[in-house]
């Protein structure tokens, strides 16, 4: 038993003896001189003020950047294309053909994904080298550099700077999502870990909605303001640089990676208060003891570690499945369906904001439910509901013109699909990536999960137009199959992680990984024995 646990047991034993003597009215001169000690109250189900503010500090410069930069580029599309045309004419004295213009614009939009993929791959390494907090602060330099390039594109007449800026802000977003998830998952007590990890999803959807709102023509969506609009990603970066330094580093990183127990205790007291930090300290010490000085693993090392094989397969499947679930198809068809329902074209951007707000509200709702309902019921139920709504959308889109009411049924199905996504896969996925691994493997796991998410995002962006052209509304049958398969996989493979320590969750995979390992011969021809536990 560790020194801290012994001390805690002695304190509780002393409390018990004093309470018992008081109940039996035994004389106790010491108690007459000092007040009766009170046992620590049960930890609150609500985050402390510092914990809540820390979540905001990391979120505003993390996943918020991703959501914001995905949506904010949509509003100035025509204005930027006009700028590219005019620049080309001034430079080469001829008009840019439509195909080349489309190619340049596609590069400006999609280069963000390439940057995100690179960012997700360097995010884990930065989190190990600089710490979670240090990596987030350093990451903002990318956002400020991106703002500089995009800001000078218009006055210099160099549309190439927009490509560079979008790439850099993609690196910033990819790094931010990985490190933010690590930080939030490590500062939260286990009874609030799911809600805290959902901060990534909440800020992502908040960024999407904010980008849509700022892009309205009444704000910065007018033609004269687009050079300012593309630079607004610097605002969240500056906000994080001002707020985050006031909060400590991740306690788990301080003790397990840096062996700085004093700083760890100070950080725990900041996040959990001077009364409730001891259980978290003991949990961290147990994990440190089991890891026994094991250094943070590289991403490629996770693929060769048979003791975590099924955890790794799980995060690959659920991160890829999140992007391949059909959520992008929903947003593609939303404009068509809203038009069919008779909504004026000039009002469609406002309705689109409603879809983003709907996803944001469900992310908040998921944050409330995840600690009560658990992870499995939300993510499995979310995928099954999405599969159901895929069938409904296939039917309503097929008979779209049969009745004036059908487009409204399609609209309802769209909002229901988004609700199901936000309540399940959209919120729980990032939580599971954090919880399925211990400290040494967690940064690399987030790197792999983030990379799979960005790769899947890119694949969907490339293949989706061909799927739509080939299958039309029947493309939702493909997503029906995908959602059903993901739900089935999670049901049989992924355990419930609510209120469990990282070591307890790892133990849940023990038999599955051992069975998998025993089927494989060791390199020397002997039976492979799983000694990781």
Image (cartoon, rainbow, N blue to C red):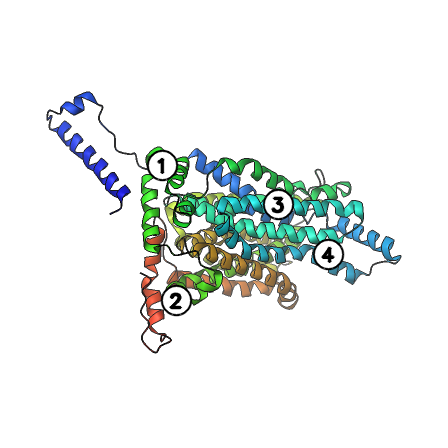
Viewer-proximal residue among 96 and 181 = 181
The label on residue 121 is: none
* Dot 2 or dot 3, earlier in sequence: 3
Mark-to-mark CA distance, 1 and 4: 50 Å
Give the answer, above or below, for where 143 lies relative to 462: above
**Extreme-right residue of the structure:** 93
The label on residue 105 is: 4
Q: Residues within 10 Å of mark 3 (few under 14, many from 20)?
A: some
Looking at the image, which residue is at 41% across and 35% down? 270
Q: Which residue, given by chain and number where applicable, does mark 2 sit on?
A: 306
**Label 1 element class:** loop
Q: How many marks?
A: 4
User: Closer to us: mark 3 or mark 1?
Assistant: 3
Viewer-proximal residue among 181 and 266 = 266
* Dot 2 or dot 1, earlier in sequence: 1
Q: Which residue, given by chain and number where applicable, does mark 1 sit on?
A: 44
């Amino acid at each position: 038993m560790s020194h801290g646990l012994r001390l805690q047991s002695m304190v509780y034993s002393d409390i018990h003896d004093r309470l018992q003597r008081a109940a039996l009215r035994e004389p106790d001169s010491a108690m007459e001189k000092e007040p009766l000690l009170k046992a620590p109250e049960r930890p609150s189900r609500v985050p402390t003020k510092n914990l809540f503010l820390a979540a905001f500090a990391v979120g505003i410069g993390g996943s918020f950047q991703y959501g914001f930069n995905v949506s904010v580029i949509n509003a100035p599309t025509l204005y930027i294309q006009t700028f590219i045309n005019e620049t080309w004419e001034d430079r080469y004295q001829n008009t840019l053909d439509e195909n080349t213009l489309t190619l340049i614009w596609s590069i400006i939009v999609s280069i963000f994904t390439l940057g995100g993929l690179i960012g997700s791959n360097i995010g884990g390494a930065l989190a190990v080298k600089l710490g979670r907090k240090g990596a987030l602060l350093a990451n903002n330099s990318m956002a400020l550099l991106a703002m500089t390039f995009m800001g000078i594109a218009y006055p210099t007449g160099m549309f190439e700077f927009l490509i560079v800026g979008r790439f850099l802000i993609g690196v910033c977003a990819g790094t931010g999502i990985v490190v933010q998830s690590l930080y939030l998952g490590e500062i939260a007590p286990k009874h609030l870990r799911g809600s805290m990890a959902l901060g990534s999803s909440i800020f992502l959807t908040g960024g999407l909605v904010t980008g849509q709102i700022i892009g309205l023509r009444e704000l910065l969506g007018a033609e004269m303001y687009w050079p300012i609009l593309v630079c607004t990603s610097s605002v969240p970066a500056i906000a994080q640089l001002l707020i985050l330094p006031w909060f400590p580093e991740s306690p788990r990183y301080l003790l397990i990676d840096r062996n700085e127990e004093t700083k760890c205790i100070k950080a725990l007291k900041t996040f959990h208060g001077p009364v409730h930090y001891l259980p978290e300290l003991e949990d961290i010490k147990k994990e440190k003891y089991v890891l026994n000085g094991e250094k943070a693993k590289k991403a490629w090392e996770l693929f060769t570690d048979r003791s975590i094989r099924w955890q790794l397969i799980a995060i690959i499947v659920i991160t890829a499945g999140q992007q391949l679930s059909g959520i992008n198809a929903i947003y593609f068809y939303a404009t068509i369906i809203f038009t069919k329902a008779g909504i004026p074209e000039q009002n469609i951007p406002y309705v689109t904001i409603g879809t983003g707000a709907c996803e944001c509200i469900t992310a908040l709702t998921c944050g409330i439910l995840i600690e009560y309902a658990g992870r499995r019921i939300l993510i499995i139920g979310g995928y099954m509901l999405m599969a159901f709504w895929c069938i409904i959308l296939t039917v309503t889109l097929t008979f779209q013109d049969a009745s004036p009411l059908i487009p409204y049924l399609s609209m309802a199905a769209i909002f229901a699909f988004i609700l199901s996504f936000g309540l399940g896969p959209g919120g729980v996925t990032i939580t599971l990536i954090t919880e399925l691994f211990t400290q040494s493997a967690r940064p690399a796991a987030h790197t792999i999960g983030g990379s799979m998410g960005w790769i899947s995002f890119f694949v969907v962006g490339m293949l989706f137009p061909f799927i739509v052209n080939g299958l039309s509304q029947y493309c939702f049958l493909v997503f029906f199959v995908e959602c059903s398969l993901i739900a089935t996989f999670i049901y049989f493979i992924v355990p419930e992680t609510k209120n469990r320590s990282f070591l307890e969750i790892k133990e849940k995979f023990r038999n599955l990984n051992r069975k998998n390992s025993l089927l494989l011969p060791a390199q020397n021809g002997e039976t492979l024995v799983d000694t990781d536990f």
